Image (spheres, helix red, strand yellow):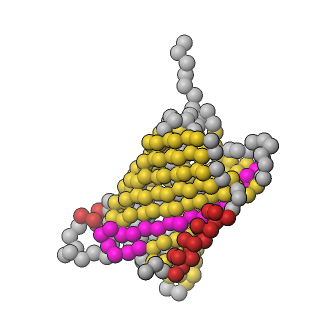
Amino acid sequence: MMPSKLRIALIFIILAMFCFNLNAQELYVYSEPASNVPAKSLSFKYAGKWMGESTLGHKHTTSRQMAESSIGLGKFLMLRPALSLGNMYNKYPDQKLRFESASIYAKLRVLSIDDIHRHFRAAAYVKGVFSKNDLQYAEITADGDQTAIQGGVILTQLLHKLAISGTGSLVEVLHPDRWKDFGGQTFYGYRSFNYSLSTGYLLLPRKYKSYEQTNFNIYLELIGSSGLDRDYAFTDLAPAIQLIVNSNAKINVGYRFQISGGAYRMGTSSLSISYERSFLNAIKHKKNE
């Protein structure tokens, strides 16, 4: 039977979808839409994640700091290299930030159906991550916690004033311990199915007069993971707010917390803050002389 907290979260999402009379937004804070950044454009993003922990009775805060760039190689293809620094895997009380991971993400838009006040997008993506972290937790991600490869699909539907996006992916951990012989016994899983369901709404402005107007958006995302070779699962809820300034700069603030599940995780709640700046037509092709 579905846990009560999960039922409440799903009911809240469904009510939000049908009760807000607002323009839909697809620039999600925690997940990725099926749409790409525009062709020949660049964006640069800084993101910070903070999580409270308790080690031997000492409460402290750990963080992950990430820098990434999205590159629009064409109408259908984008790339995103990224680096992260962190202290989440340091031994307490060491709080120094160290190089943690490098990754490359590629997304290919495979289907576009456009109509008046509506469109549908489908995309496939793959992500490779090299991480210096050791295996410590059951949770499997492609966020820098483990060396891993991830592949998945994204479906995004815009219906006039409502946008809904769903993601499903497989994550494979490639840590060297995966191939060691522990006598058939190991705590860690190496394969998971990860998913998300996201909605977004434009609160302000009520009417557009120019692209220089600041947008204020709200988001609600359901994020989860289930182990495929180990028995673990969890589901998180992540409300967030976003400001878009001059149509080319985004400021995001979100809070993610667990609503169901019992996986051994680093933490069950975190705060995320990010800033992203976009540059249209930044990639110039030289004309033949």
For residue 274, which quarter of the picture? Answer: bottom right
Q: Residue at x 34, y 60 (%)?
A: 172
Image location (x, y in percent) of residue 190: 32, 66
Front-lying residue, 276 or 205: 205
Query: Does the magenta-highlighted stretch encompass residue 128?
Result: no
Identify which residue, 243 or 264, lies in the foreground: 243
Q: Is residue 280 above or below residue 132?
A: above
Q: Which residues are magenta?
A: 212-233
Can residue 80 be seen from the camera position used here?
no
100, 194: nearer the viewer:
194
Report the residue at 57% width, 28% height from top: 284
Horizontal side of 213 relative to 98 (left or right) equals right
Magenta span: chief secondary structure: strand
Could you tell me which quadrant the C terminus lies in? Answer: top right
Residue 205 in sight in this render = yes
Q: Is residue 243 left or right of residue 224?
A: right
Q: Residue at x 43, y 68 (%)?
A: 225
- Of residue 9 and residue 281, the one placed in the foreground of this image is 9
Left or right of residue 188: residue 241: right
Measured as percent of width and height from the top left, residue 276 is found at: 63, 50
Q: How many marks?
A: 0
Q: Position of residue 80 (x, y in %)?
A: 50, 46
Query: Which residue is depicted at the point 47% across and 39% down?
Result: 77
- Position of residue 115 measured from the top left corner of the image (x, y, whole percent): 58, 41
